[in-house]
Structure formats: C-alpha cells, structure tokens
Image (cartoon, rainbow, N blue to C red):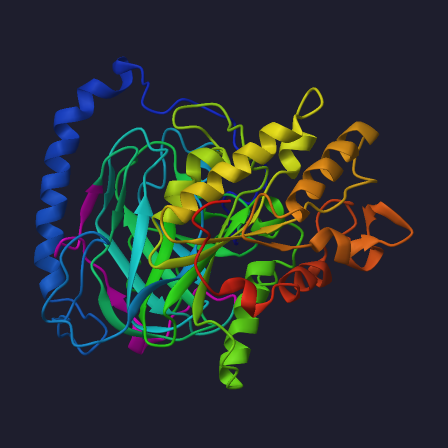
Amino acid sequence: MTRHDGGGLGVPHARRSGHRDPRHHLPHHVLLSAVLAVIVGLSAAIYIGVDAGDGGRREQDTLASSRTGPRSAAAASTGVWVGSWAAAPVGSEPLTERDGTAGRTVRNVVHTSVGGTSARITLSNLYGTRALTVTSVTLAVAAGDDSPAADPGTLRRLTFGGRPAISIPAGEQAVSDAVPLTVPRDTDVLVSLYTPTSAGPVTFHHRAQQTSYVADGEHTADVTGTPYTGQSTYWRYLTALDVLSDEADGTVVAFGDSITDGSTSTPGANRRWPDVLADRLRASLSDGDDDAPRYGVVNAGISGNRVLTGGLGRPANNPSGLDRFDRDVLDRPNVKVVVIDLGVNDILRSRNTADPDAVLNGLRDLVRRAHAHGIKAVGTTLLPFRGHRGYTDAREDVRRRINAEIRSGSVYDTVVDVDRAMHDPYDPRRLKSEYDSGDHLHPSDRGYRKMAQLIKWSQLRGAGRAEL
C-alpha cells in the first residue's frame, strides 16, 4: 500500500529553531558525534568501490564544490554556471520535529529549465535544530514523467568537498561538488539523499505542485523506483540545481508569492508562469530567434509571501521578501534579471488597511539591491481579487494605488502589466473568468500561461538602471 508522507498543503506552524530542552538532547551529543564519525568513514570506504554510473569508475573531472570556492583546473567542460531549477526554503515541515527523515531516503523530483554538461545541488538545513547528517546523495535523469525510476546510465553519486557524506550545521546550507553529467533541458531530474539520523524539523518547500518520493532505508542508488512507496507533495532539503551550460549565459529569477509559486496550477504538469517562460525561451532559441535571451529560469516564489512581513520563529517561517532577497535572488549563479510579482499578501493579510507607500518603498529597496549587483528588475502590476474572501473596497483601493505607481515607472526598470491584460473588462476589480482558477485570486493554467506570454524579450535584456 502506498504511504502518503506529508501530503498536506497547509503552511507549517511557526516554531523557533535552535531552542531545545537540554533534558532531551545533551545525553546524545557524544554518541551522535561518534556515530557520525563511523558513518563518514564507512561511507568513504564504500564509495570508492561503488558504481558512479559509468561501470564502476569514479568520476575524476569535477568542478567547484562551492559557488565561491576555487575552480578545478581539471575541468574539461566549458560554459557558464546558471540556475536550472530552484525552490525557496519555506519553513519547518510539520510533525518532523522529533524524527526528521531519519532512516529514510528522500527522492526529490525537479524539472530543468535549461540543460548542461555538469551539475551541482544545494541542500539546506535552515530550519533544522541539529546538524543534518547526509551519508549518500545521488543525481539522475528520471526514466519518465511522474516516476521515481531513474535512467540507469545517468546515476551519479555526489560529493561535498570530495567526500560522499556531509554534516550540515543547523541553519546552514551546503553546495555539492560538480559532477560531469549531460543534463537535458525540460526534463525531470531525481535528487536522492539518505539521512541516518534526525536533524529535527525538515527544511522544506510546501507547495511543490509536484510529487516526490520516499523510501524506508538507504536506496539512493536504486534505479527501479520500487522501494519508493511513499509519496510527498513537498520538496525536502533541496533548494537548487545548477548546471554548467553552453546553451544559456545567465539566470532569470521569478520572485513572488503563491502566484509565482504556481498554486492552483495542474500538479506535475509544470504550468506555473516561470515554467511557461522557460518553455518560451527554449522554443525561441530552437527557432533561431536572436532576440530571445539565453537564460535558465528559476522559481523563487513562496505561497503567502509578503514584501514587508515574515512569519514567526527564528529563522522566520515564510520570511519576508526583504529578508530573503539575498538568499533567493542575489546568491543564485549569474543572475541577469529578476521578475518581481509581490505585494498582494501585504494587502490581504494586513489587519488594518495596508500602507501602499510602505509596500512600494519595500519594492524599491529590492530593486536597489538588484541594481547594486547589476541585475535588471522587471516588475508586474498586482492582479485583482474581487470575489476572494479577503476582498474589501479599501483593499482594492490600496491595490489600485500601488499599481498606479508601478505603471508610472518609479519602481521597476520595466513593467509587465498583468492586471490590465487579465482583469475582467466589465469589472476591473475581478480576474477575467478564463484566467481565474475559481478562487478569484490565483490564475488558472491559462492565466499563468498568459502572464508568461506578456513578458517581452526586450524586457529581459540589458542591465538595471543605476538609479531610479
């Protein structure tokens, strides 16, 4: 029988990380350190003789183990590191405080925007309360859509600083060494990791709109998918897949809330608006369109996200756009453009009438930070939401005031006016029915496609203005 593991879609209950009752944890400190030392030693010994996906020979030509570390002179591939997929860590997964994913293998399924000749991943233990011990990580191209099975010839074991096991301290992340692998564009990729012990709460992205898998025991090298009897609608620990690409020369980051996250889009179909934008870019390049930029597209949307206010806890669950901008945009590789669609939740979740000037100043601060890194800032107007349970005339007035200022050109380098293109012409306070998912806030698949189609190639070219 299939076990559904963590299939709920609710935002996790906020909790403070790093504050533990010592009665439950201090007696195990020495024991865990000893266990970790044994595990790392055994894993390193086993790794030398394990198939790395090429008939048992360990891959020799790896690139950098960190975005900021030195590049290996042995690298034979050429190209540029770009983001092919990403997910912003949201918070701590409910009901994982005690056991985490101890004794289980998590197989995350992610979809590439661009391909490359090498790959590396980022694992996050941002919301853990103890070190995250990972003794084995593999990457493989999926054998088919919506499947835990891998293409056997593509399975690669990943290392961190040359070692197959790693301990990631609570609140931190780790970037793997690069591994040579032909990663196709527009394809599902499997990233599997085994954790023998608990790190406390699991760092996750809760609205993946994608089924991932879980197996009891260590099955990172399994290609059949048979042991993966558990299913999950979450992405766990994994926050980025970068590729060394000769088909892209930069990254565009989609930064926003649930509308960017793809809430209400068809699960497993990759119909979020950033997915459609990636589809358009690939198609234009295939057609020889010289105007189309050569970019990978990564999604940094978080459902419920606000510009100004984050959730509770330390670190905060669902951190504000201001607090997470460096992590989710500036720290991505070779970012050329950020597309910002944020502000609706500041209006909807304010107990009193939201201050439009405060929201606009927050957005301007994001743009200034992008410009400081040479990144162009593309902004959208805010979609209407009449009919949604949170609608009031006062909130509609705030939305209109924010949109008027965005349209004036005083916030972003260039504006994609999704509101004007997608509202009901007979009632501009509502989404046009064909673009409405039914909740009168989030677009339908057709609405998400329309959002992506409104972005012009000229808007993705060039650098950000020095001053606004």
Q: Residue furthest front?
A: 467
Q: Is residue 441 visible?
A: yes
Q: Nearer the viewer, residue 389 or 71?
A: 71
Task: Please tell me which residue is depicted at 62% across the width and 48% down the height of the picture.
Answer: 409
Q: Position of residue 208 (x, y in %)?
A: 53, 51
The answer to whether 427 appears left or right of 58 in the picture is right
Q: Nearer the viewer, residue 412 or 175?
A: 412
- Please tell me in which quadrant of the rendered image residue 397 appears: top right
Q: Which residues are magenta?
A: 146-167
Asked if the magenta segment contains residue 157, the reply would be yes
Q: Position of residue 161 (x, y in %)?
A: 14, 53
Q: Position of residue 421 (x, y in %)?
A: 76, 58
Task: Please tell me which residue is depicted at 51% across the width and 70% down the height of the picture.
Answer: 145
Task: Please tell me which residue is depicted at 38% across the width and 72% down the height of the picture.
Answer: 248
Q: Residue furthest bottom?
A: 288
Task: Please tell me which residue is depicted at 23% across the width and 73% down the height of the picture.
Answer: 53
- Please tell me in which quadrant of the rendered image residue 463 appears: bottom left
Assign the magenta stretch its main secondary structure: loop
Asked if the magenta segment contains residue 330, the reply would be no
The answer to whether 180 appears left or right of 336 in the picture is left
Instruction: Relative to 311, say whether 449 is above or below.
Output: below
Q: Is residue 236 visible?
A: no
Q: Residue furthest right?
A: 426
Q: Position of residue 108 (x, y in %)?
A: 41, 56
Instruction: Relative to 50, say whether 193 is above or below.
Output: above
